[in-house]
Every structure is written in structure tokens, then in C-alpha cells.
């Protein structure tokens, strides 16, 4: 025997699911913002990973392109520095995001 859509079992389940979703929402006050910020150690690790990943990614792409075209070390150096710049930009964006500094300051 199949259960109906409006049966009490489904209504009870829907109510419990709604309450769980409401309880899981984070409050939007200042205390909640403090709780959601990463720890100093976690932020430092994230910034370090951003920097290292950019440098290694750029170096690998440059090395592979140099191997492909036979132009060692030109593309390796170009992509190494591009990867370093991208890593620094990503780290800067991450630091700005966790410090709650607005991207654009509006004067007046």
C-alpha cells in the first residue's frame, strides 16, 4: 500500500526538516562574524598555500611549454613570474576578505 503525499508521516518529517534548517542558519550579528573568521594559523596556512601554488603552477606550465617548444628557459621564467604574481594577488584577496575591509572606499 503506497503512502499518500499529505500523510501525517510526511508532514511530521517536513516540520522536523524545517526546524533543523532554521537552527542551522548562522546569526548575522557581530559575534557570528567573529566565529566564522579563520584562526590566525589557518589564515597563514591558506596564504602560504596560495603563494606556493601560484609559483609551482606557473613554473610547471612554463617548464612544460619550454619542453614542448624547445625554448628553455624563456617561457619557464615568464610563467614563473606570472605564477608568483597570481599567487600574491590571490593571497592579497584572501587577506582582504578575512579582514572585512571593503574593496572600494566611497568618499563623501
Image (spheres, rainbow, N blue to C red):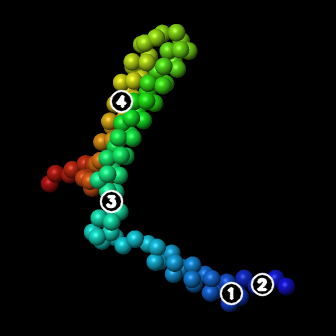
| For residue 33, side relative to residue 71 (left or right) | left
| For residue 80, side relative to residue 96 (left or right) | right
N-terminal label among 1 and 2: 2
Secondary element at tag 2: loop
**Front in this rendered view, residue 4 or 67:** 67
Which-is-in-front pick, marks 1 and 4?
Answer: 4
Looking at the image, residue 18 lies above or below residue 100:
below
The x, y position of residue 52, in whole percent, is 39, 35
Residue behind mark 3:
37
State which quarter of the image contains the N terminus.
Answer: bottom right
Looking at the image, residue 96 lies above or below residue 7:
above
Marker disc for residue 3:
2
The x, y position of residue 73, in whole percent, is 43, 12
Residue that sits furthest to the right in the current view: 1
Residue behind mark 1:
9
- Say which residue appears at 51% left-offset and 18% top-offset: 65
Q: CA distance from mark 3 to mark 4?
A: 26 Å
Looking at the image, residue 8 lies above or below residue 29:
below
N-terminal label among 1 and 4: 1
Residue behind mark 4:
84
Secondary element at tag 1: helix
N-terminal label among 3 and 1: 1
Residue that sits furthest to the front in the current view: 41
Q: CA distance from mark 1 to mark 4?
A: 58 Å
Q: Residues within 10 Å of mark 4 (few under 14, many from 20)?
A: many
- Say which residue appears at 21% left-offset and 50% top-offset: 105
Amino acid at each position: 500500500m503506497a503512502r499518500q503525499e499529505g500523510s501525517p508521516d510526511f508532514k511530521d518529517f517536513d516540520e522536523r526538516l524545517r526546524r533543523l534548517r532554521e537552527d542551522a542558519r548562522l546569526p548575522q550579528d557581530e559575534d557570528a562574524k567573529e566565529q566564522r573568521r579563520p584562526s590566525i594559523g589557518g589564515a597563514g596556512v591558506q596564504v602560504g598555500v596560495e603563494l606556493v601554488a601560484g609559483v609551482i603552477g606557473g613554473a610547471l606550465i612554463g617548464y612544460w611549454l619550454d619542453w614542448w617548444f624547445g625554448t628553455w628557459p624563456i617561457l619557464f621564467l615568464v610563467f614563473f613570474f606570472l605564477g608568483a604574481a597570481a599567487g600574491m594577488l590571490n593571497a592579497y584577496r584572501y587577506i582582504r576578505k578575512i579582514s572585512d575591509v571593503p574593496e572600494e572606499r566611497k568618499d563623501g
